[in-house]
Structure formats: structure tokens, C-alpha cells
Image: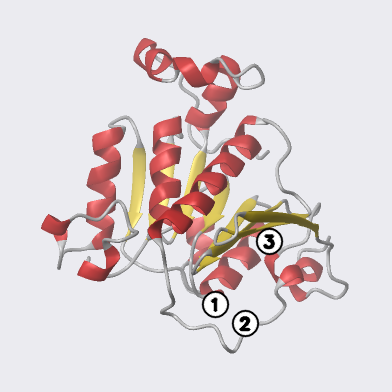
């Protein structure tokens, strides 16, 4: 785990009440909860997968969320982007995201960025966090975050879905394969629009939030060096070992 970038403030009596049940987890406890409060997490994007990741992390007591998502709410968002609402159609997504999260956790610090991740802004966004949860649908965004995660030595939880399938892995720079070790190229057949069932997005999103909590709080065994693939049409789950790729340009550039 990286050192927290949010100033350390002891848990308040209110926070101890809110997080009482999860602090009963033996290897989390009050110390782990304090680590979550002191932590900052970047989520990109905050749509079908990212909205549930952000909501679960806000509920778990993460102290700061850095959120990047462009555009205005559309009717087609509402089957899966659970931080968007009918009354916000035509208005900026990032503002709907911000208000819904603060309704849940008014103690949360939010950096709301009305942009999608790109090569231009990835370095600054990653610099503001301790850990990244990658929920972007497009590989150029994902590769930009992956590159900065490795260069800045920030853990990255990579989660994605398509139709009734999903996958998730956790990248620890210098210890495990990065995203481009696993997916060297931007798949030429990958399209921006694809079939989505919101419950599938939510399934991998909850797992992504769990992975983030595990890494930040030092809890359990993250999916480092392993790729979990899910076929929810058949309810089958497969965990594959993945290795760092020789001559990976991203891992090589980090000097590791």
C-alpha cells in the first residue's frame, strides 16, 4: 500500500457509528478503517461500472474520491449508471455523481472532473490519488491510466465488462503484470457502444470496490498476478494466473 495523501484525521464518533459493522471484520478493525479515511481513490469513468464502485467506496468510508466523467446525462444511461437520475437528463453527469455521493456520505471529499481520461490529463489525475479503479470502456483511456499508474507507482484495480461477461485484476507496480502486459494492443474490434446489463456492471463494480478496500486497508489477498473472468450467463468463474510480459514498454519504462 502507498502512503496516504489525505491528511490523517482520527475517526470521529459519528464515523465509528457509521462503520461499526464493517470494523467488526477481524483484519480490518479501526486501524483499517482509519486507512480508508486517509486514502484517496481515482475512479474513471463513473458510469455503469464506475458509479457503483464510487458509491460502494463512499459507503465504505474512503476519505477522498477523484472522479473523471464527461458529458451530460442521457436516457440510455439510466439502465446502469446508478448515480444518474431522470430529473438530471441533459445536465452534466459529474454533477449528478457528486450530489448523489454526498447524499450518501456528506463527509466525503470529492474532486469532480468533467472530462474523460486522456494522455493530457492522466498524469495530474493519478497524482491526486493513492489508488486507481479503472472503469473506462475505451482502451486509450485505460492505457493512459495504466502508464501513469506504473510511472507513479500507484496500485490500479482494472475492471471491465461486455454483455454478460466481466473481468477484474489488480496491478501493483513492480510486482505484477500491468494492463498492457495482459492486453498489449487496443483490440481493433472493440466498439464504444456494446450490450450492457446493469446488474453485470454492478457485479464487477462491487468486486472492484472490494479490491480497492483490500489494497488500501491491507486486507485479504488481492487479485495481484491473477485475472478473474466471469461469465454470468452461465454463472461460471475462472481465475487465471497472468505474468509480466517481456519487453513490455510500460513496465520497461518504469525501470522495474
**Left or right of residue 77: residue 137:** right
Tags 1 and 2 touching, CB below 8 Å: yes
Q: Which element carries disc 1, helix, strand or loop?
A: helix
Nearest to viewer (mark 2 / mark 3): 2
Residue 39, compared with residue 8, is above or below; it is: below
Find disc 2 in the rendering and name its residue.
186
**Which residue is more in the foreground, 184 or 116?**
184
Mark 1 lies on residue:
140
In 3D space, how far apart are the residues under numbered discs 1 and 2 (Cα atoms)? 7 Å
Q: Residue at x 52, y 72 (%)?
A: 141
Residue 193, label in figure: none
Q: Is residue 128 visible?
A: no
Q: Is residue 20 above or below residue 163?
A: above
The CA distance from mark 3 to mark 1 is 17 Å
Disc 2 from disc 3: Cα separation: 20 Å
Q: Which residue is mark 3?
A: 151
Categorize mark 3 by other alpha carbons within 10 Å: few (<14), some (14-19), many (20+): some
Q: Quadrant of the C terminus?
A: bottom right
Q: Position of residue 220 (x, y in %)?
A: 70, 32
Amino acid at each position: 500500500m502507498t502512503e496516504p495523501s489525505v491528511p490523517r484525521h482520527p475517526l470521529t464518533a459519528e464515523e465509528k457509528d457509521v462503520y461499526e459493522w464493517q470494523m467488526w471484520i477481524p483484519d480490518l478493525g479501526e486501524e483499517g478503517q482509519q486507512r480508508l479515511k486517509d486514502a484517496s481513490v481515482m475512479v474513471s469513468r463513473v458510469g455503469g461500472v464506475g458509479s457503483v464502485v464510487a458509491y460502494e467506496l463512499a459507503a465504505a468510508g474512503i476519505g477522498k474520491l477523484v472522479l473523471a466523467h464527461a458529458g451530460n446525462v442521457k436516457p440510455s444511461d439510466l439502465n446502469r449508471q446508478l448515480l444518474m437520475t431522470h430529473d438530471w437528463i441533459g445536465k452534466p453527469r459529474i454533477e449528478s455523481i457528486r450530489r448523489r455521493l454526498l447524499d450518501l456520505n456528506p463527509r466525503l471529499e470529492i474532486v469532480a472532473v468533467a472530462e474523460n481520461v486522456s494522455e493530457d490529463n492522466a498524469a495530474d489525475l493519478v497524482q491526486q490519488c493513492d489508488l486507481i479503479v479503472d472503469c473506462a470502456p475505451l482502451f486509450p483511456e485505460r492505457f493512459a491510466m495504466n502508464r501513469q499508474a506504473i510511472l507513479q507507482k500507484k496500485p490500479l484495480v482494472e475492471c471491465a465488462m461486455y454483455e454478460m461477461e466481466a473481468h477484474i485484476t489488480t496491478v501493483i507496480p513492480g510486482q505484477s503484470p500491468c494492463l498492457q502486459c495482459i492486453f498489449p494492443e487496443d483490440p481493433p474490434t472493440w466498439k464504444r457502444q456494446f450490450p450492457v446489463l446493469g446488474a453485470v456492471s454492478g457485479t464487477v463494480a462491487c468486486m472492484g470496490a472490494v479490491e480497492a478496500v483490500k489494497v488500501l486497508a491491507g486486507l485479504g489477498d488481492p487479485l495481484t498476478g491473477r485475472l478473474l473472468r466471469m461469465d454470468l450467463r452461465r454463472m461460471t468463474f475462472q481465475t487465471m494466473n497472468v505474468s509480466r510480459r517481456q519487453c513490455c514498454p510500460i513496465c520497461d519504462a518504469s525501470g522495474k
